[in-house]
Image (cartoon, grey):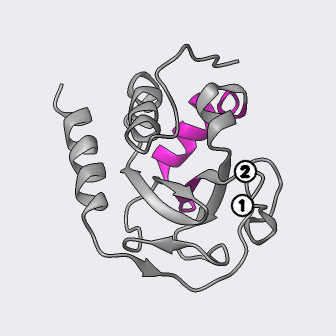
Amino acid sequence: MRRPVLYLAAVVAALSAAPATLPGGMAVSASGVEPDEVDWTSAPVRLLMVEAPGCIYCEAWQREIGPGYPKSTEGKTAPLLVTDLDGPWPDGIALQRRPTITPTFILLDQGKEVSRLEGYPGDRFFYPLIEQMLTAAGLHSAEGRDEG
């Protein structure tokens, strides 16, 4: 199937873009923590999910992955923050470019974009792609995963 290759190509392309800082603001995370309250020192790695109202792929992710993500190895390594495509944006983050596709999953280290996954590839491919992002960033090894 060609779809995962396209998502990997988007992640690789995003890594080569020049960084840009977005304006600050607040967004609610799945854990109920406001991003401007995030302690980057105690939890330096986060996965920012950019979504939009009415996005059927965002809704599919929330239904298929959302409930188990915080309990997964990936969710423990990179806790989820959620923001709307139109903002407001978490304070102090530096993205390589503004997202235009929903959902977009952006791996942040100390608030700086490390890599991104544009679109939701489905429950079968989501975790392997996030695992690749974490491993490529040197943030996670390919050891067993607990999806809760």
Query: Element type at marker 1?
Result: loop
The image shows residue 44, relative to residue 134, as above or below, that is below
**Quarter the N terminus occupies:** top left
The answer to which of 120 and 40 lies nearer the viewer is: 40
Mark identifier at residue 40: 1
Q: Which residue: 43% across, 35% down?
A: 135
Spot occupied by residue 45 in the image (x, y as percentages of width and height) = 61, 50
Residue holding disc 2: 43
| Whether residue 27 can be seen here | yes
The answer to which of 61 and 148 lies nearer the viewer is: 148
Query: Element type at marker 2?
Result: loop
Q: Reply yes or no: does residue 65 show up in magenta.
A: yes
| Whether residue 66 can be seen here | no
Q: For this view, does 64 lie left or right of residue 70?
A: left
Q: Reply yes or no: does residue 46 show up in magenta.
A: no
Q: In which quarter of the image is residue 61?
A: top right
**Quarter the C terminus occupies:** top right
Mark identifier at residue 67: none
Other residues around mark 2 within 10 Å, as few (<14) / some (14–19) / many (≥20): some
* Type of the residue with mark 1: Trp
Residues drawn in magenta: 47-70
**Residues at badges 1 and 2 in contact (C-beta under 8 Å)?**
yes
Spot occupied by residue 60 in the image (x, y as percentages of width and height) = 53, 37
